[in-house]
Image (cartoon, rainbow, N blue to C red):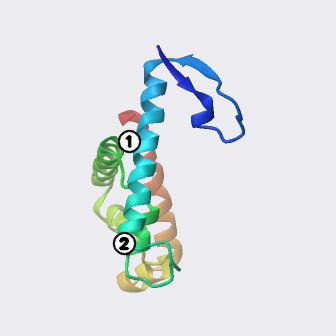
Amino acid sequence: MTTINLRDYYPFYTQDHLIDVPDEVAALFSEFEHREAAYRLRTYRHKAYFSLDCNDGIEHEAVFVALSPWEHYERKITAQELRAALATLPEKQAGRVYAHFFLGKSKAEIARAEGVNEKVVRASITRGLCNMEKVLKNIL
């Protein structure tokens, strides 16, 4: 157990208020303080305290804190599971789902490129998503 002063963390405390918290909570508070300090330093170094309309990327780095290693790992695993579920689909369904969701093509564009009716593409994508859902439910 660690003793912390709530006045250090909450501005509405006007007097010291000491409480005992588990070590994990104290570590989270400490990590938050370190990240806030790093954010302030980053905005100061890159002079990102001015208008954020300059489109040079500084504001993105200053505003959006980098992902933690756990978040990177979770995204990687999710992408692998999605690719595995996509690989279980028949070739045409997989191609249509990939083109629509990953390449950002509209269903009408896919239908024109394949020379088929748009309803066929819609039905194929819907069936593909249902099949992927079944596969992902089995994985999870």
**Residue 134 in view, yes or no:** no
User: Which mark, residue 135?
Assistant: 1
Q: Secondary structure at mark 2?
A: loop
Q: Amino acid at mark 1?
A: Val
N-term mark: 2 or 1 = 2
Is 127 placed above or below 21 here?
below
Q: Residue at x 42, y 51 (%)?
A: 37
Q: Amino acid at mark 2?
A: His
User: Which mark, residue 69?
Assistant: none
User: Which of the 4 image quadrants contains residue 33?
Assistant: top left
Say which quadrant the C terminus sits in: top left
In this view, the residue in front, 28 or 3, is: 3
Residue 3, percent across and down? 51, 19
Numbered-mark total = 2
Question: What residue would you read off at disc 2?
Answer: 46
In this view, the residue in front, 103 or 135, is: 103
| Outermost residue toward the top in this view | 1
Residue 88, percent across and down? 29, 50
Left or right, 92 with respect to 35, comes to left
Measured Cα–Cα span from mark 2 to mark 1: 46 Å
| Outermost residue toward the front in this view | 15
User: Which of the 4 image quadrants contains residue 115?
Assistant: bottom left
